[in-house]
Amino acid sequence: MKKILVCVSALCLLISVKSISTPTPQSNILGTFGMWTAYVFHDGTGKVCYMAAEPTESKGKYTSRDDVFLTITHRPAEKTYDVVSMTAGFTYQKGSKPNIRIDKKKAITLMPVEDMAWAKDDKTDASLVKDMVAGSNAYVNGTSKRGTKITDTFSLKGFSKAYNAINEACGR
């Protein structure tokens, strides 16, 4: 149940994430750290802190694609932290199993819903964030509803500083 609430919350967050280059008026930029930008805003339930990055490289034979972001979110009022989500820029193929890999570690399967994907539970989120703090790159693989295989590479340069900024802003 908690994961479903997180997914619904993340869908609401998507509106803010999709406008990262031009944050919504209620979003405040905490700072840009390397490839990552940290934000805070208030929704109806309380403070939301998140950080996001765009891919440094995307591979795949696609002609167009919406915005792509890898995001880490804290929602203290809901007691959810380190929620890892991927906004793919395309709708995932039904039955596909997108995955994320940090450097050369084992890939972790994500749960896709429309154009987003999440880690399966809190423990996986925490493990991914721990690996991202120590890592250099994150690689996300997914298959679009048209069957196009796409790999996005995200630099983790600045990840730790952005993570510290959202931790501080959300009192973690």
Image: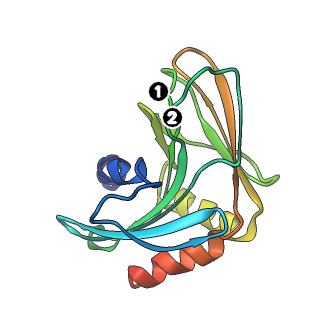
Local packing at callout 2 (Cα closer than 10 Å; few below 14, some 14-19, many 20+) is some
Give SS at disc 1.
loop
- 150 and 7: which one is in front? 150
Label 2 vs label 1, nearer the camera: 2
Q: Amino acid at mark 2?
A: Gly
Q: Position of residue 48 (x, y in %)?
A: 33, 68
Residue 82, numbered circle: none
Q: Please tell me in which quadrant of the rendered image residue 20 appears.
A: bottom left
Using the rendered view, name the quadrant where residue 140 is placed.
top right
Q: Residue at x 54, y 29 (%)?
A: 65
**Residue 160: horizontal and vertical position, in percent?**
64, 74
The image quadrant of residue 141 is top right
What colour scheme governs how the chains and residues are painted in the rendered image of this protein? rainbow
Give the residue furthest to the top.
Answer: 146
Q: Total label count? A: 2
Q: CA distance from mark 2 to mark 1?
A: 7 Å
* Kind of residue indicated by mark 1: Thr
Whole-percent x and y of residue 114? 41, 31
The residue carrying mark 2 is 89
**Residue occupied by mark 1:** 91
On the question of residue 132 being in view, the answer is: yes
Where is the C terminus found, in terms of image quarters?
bottom left
- Asked if disc 2 and disc 1 are in contact, CB closer than 8 Å, the reply is no
